[in-house]
Image (spheres, helix red, strand yellow):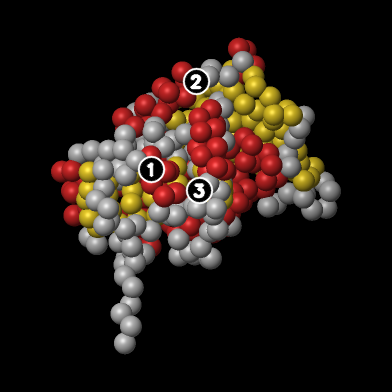
Amino acid sequence: MTAVEQPKPVLILGGSGQAGSGTAALLRQWHPTLPLTIAGRDIDRAQRVADELGTAAAVTIDLRRSDLGLPAEHNYSAVVAALWDDHLNGLHYAQDHELPYLSISSGLVEIAPEVVAGAQRLHTSPILVASHFCAGTVALATLYIARQFQRVDTIRIGAVLDESDTGGPAGTADLQRWATATTAGMVRRDGVFTWVNGPDTQANVARSDGVVLPGQSIAILDVPSLALATGAPNVRFDMAVGESAARHRGDPPSAEIRIDLEGVDPTGAPLSISRYLIHPAGQRPLTALGIALGIERQLGLRGEPLSPGIHTPETLHDPAYAAQRMTEIGATLIDTPSQS
């Protein structure tokens, strides 16, 4: 008899961080026999995460090396960059071994090297660019709501990021790096992708309890993803960093994202819908879900394995399936107070 080939582990760079460990926990829950390798600079921390998961290993990595400092005999099924792959060696490692690759930390202002590297070796690896807010889950929730429209004219998203819930040191570093890259926001206005600066970036972002926080338009991949997926000529994503409604009540910080859509319904009548996507445990579970959905799809654990090329979350996932998974991890989509 021919021996059954054992599945190869998913290599999670930054697997002991908030997003990486959350992703690993979801993958373990969904696919108990899928082996995982938790990679980080601190082997003790990585080993603790691996021990909690079971069917997992821990390794140290060096992102400055093209081989990541990993032994040549190690084999993997996919590479997840749950941190900033600053030298792109995680991507190069995936391409050298023809493995799927997923990243979440490049942001709209930093994806050019990643996209060019993917284009230059287009036929080696499926590359999932998921540097969206919460790794694409907010965009997928928006597309789920948009299914009620025949035509979407305007999408406006306002996210409250609790100042105590920025994603740990790696998440804080991402925010600081993006702020250094540009203070401008990217919007789609009357069908044109436009950079806005100064007063045009300023916006009011309403918490779920009605309190309004000062925010601003940000340059984020959700804008082109949603604009091109729906055809909406007007798309804007604003973010406020401050106290979430849950923390104001004395609870742990929550993730609160207001999603407003305007257009026409299937009968041609005007339609306007406003919802809040809320998770009581903050942005970490939503981000981990976005990554886990991507890996599940890349490996063919749901649907066919991806072909080599560059992909984004909205091109891979059924929004209804994503919404179902959001509900399973404790997220809710609720009407805004004005609609209740």
Q: Nearer the viewer, residue 191 or 108?
A: 108
- Image side of residue 19 versus residue 305, left or right: left
Of the residues under marks 3 and 2, which one precedes in the sequence? 3
For the residue marked with disc 3, what is the amino acid?
A: Ile
Disc 3 on helix, strand or loop?
strand
Snapshot quadrant of residue 250? top left
Residue at image point 69% right, 42% down: 228
Q: Amino acid at mark 2?
A: Ala
Q: Is residue 316 above or below residue 63?
A: below
Residue type highlighted by circle 1: Gly
Local SS, label 1: helix
Q: CA distance from mark 3 to mark 2?
A: 23 Å
Label 3 sits on residue: 127
Q: CA distance from mark 2 to mark 1?
A: 22 Å
Q: CA distance from mark 1 to mark 3?
A: 11 Å
Label for residue 90? 1
Number of numbered discs:
3
- Element carrying mark 2: helix
Residue that sits furthest to the top in the current view: 198
Residue at horizontal 22%, vertical 55%?
57
Q: Is residue 80 left or right of residue 266?
A: left
Q: Inspect this view and state whether residue 303 appears.
A: yes
**Of the residues tagged 2 and 1, which is closer to the observer?**
1
Residue 181 — which label?
2
Percent coordinates x, y for residue 311 in the rendering: 56, 48
In the rendered image, the residue lying farthest to the right is 268
Sequence-wise first label, 2 or 1? 1
The one of 293 and 93 positioned closer to us in this rendering: 93
Give the camera-side residue of 99 and 231: 99
Q: Residue furthest bottom?
A: 1
Find residue 201 and report its horizontal and vertical position in percent: 60, 19
